[in-house]
């Protein structure tokens, strides 16, 4: 994809996928992935200059967590290719654990590698079975 897409171009791409697309001025184009709770269905996420239409959060169906929402894992449509994708957003988790009487702070490691414009990270993958 050459050059940055305009808001109007992105709106045109979104219009193909939504029954009632928002007006061009109301379309939310997100570049900062650090607060993944604010990323909603119908938003467009720009990762590496490529637009993804956010659909829904994925639900965990394993490990006894039936239908537990994974807010950092989103279903999306790649607006350039039309393919369905899974977008896994990075988050840093900090907690204190006491092991053998010793308190230690820990954080989740960086696991994913596609940077957003604001420095957040995400992994893009095709859903299982597709």
Image (cartoon, grey):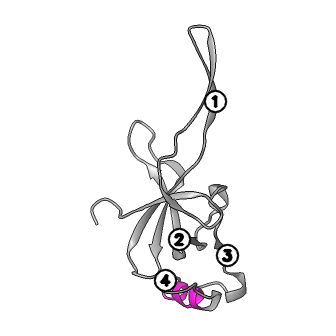
What SS does tag 4 mark?
loop
Question: Which circle's residue, 1 or 4, is located before the other in the chain?
Answer: 4
Viewer-side label of 4, 3: 3
Q: Name the residue: 54% across, 84% down.
A: 14
Place of residue 114 in the rendered image (x, y in percent of width and height, measured from the top left) = 49, 61
Disc 3 on helix, strand or loop?
loop
Can you name the residue that lies furthest to the top here? 101
Position of residue 122 measured from the top left corner of the image (x, y, whole percent): 51, 58
Q: CA distance from mark 4 to mark 2?
A: 21 Å
Q: Which residue is mark 1?
A: 95
Which circle's residue, 2 or 3, is located before the other in the chain? 3
Residue 17 marker: 4
Q: CA distance from mark 2 to mark 3?
A: 17 Å
- Residue range in magenta is 9-20
Q: Residue at x 66, y 63 (%)?
A: 118
**Residue 28: mark:** 3
Q: Is residue 82 left or right of residue 89?
A: left
- Report the Cα–Cα distance between label 3 and label 1: 33 Å
Q: Earlier in the sequence, mark 2 or mark 1?
A: 2
Q: Which badge, 4 or 2, comes first in the chain's sequence? A: 4
29 over 2 or under it: above or below: above
Callout 1: few (<14), some (14-19), or many (20+) C-alpha neighbours within 10 Å? few
In the rendered image, the quadrant that contains the C terminus is bottom left
Query: How would you rate the neighbour count of disc 3 (Cα within 10 Å): few for under 14, some for 14-19, many for 20 or more?
Result: some
Where on the picture, by quarter, is residue 120? Answer: bottom right
């Amino acid at each position: 994809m050459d050059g940055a897409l305009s808001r109007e171009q992105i709106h045109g791409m979104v219009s193909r996928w939504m029954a009632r697309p928002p007006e061009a001025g109301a379309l939310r184009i997100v570049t900062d992935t650090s607060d993944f709770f604010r990323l909603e269905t119908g938003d467009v996420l720009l990762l590496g200059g490529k637009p993804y239409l956010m659909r829904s959060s994925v639900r965990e169906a394993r490990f006894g967590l039936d239908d537990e929402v994974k807010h950092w894992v989103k279903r999306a449509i790649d607006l350039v290719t039309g393919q369905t994708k899974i977008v896994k957003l990075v988050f840093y988790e900090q907690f204190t654990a006491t092991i053998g009487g010793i308190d230690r702070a820990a954080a989740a490691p960086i696991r994913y590698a596609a940077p957003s414009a604001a420095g957040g990270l995400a992994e893009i993958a095709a859903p299982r079975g597709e």
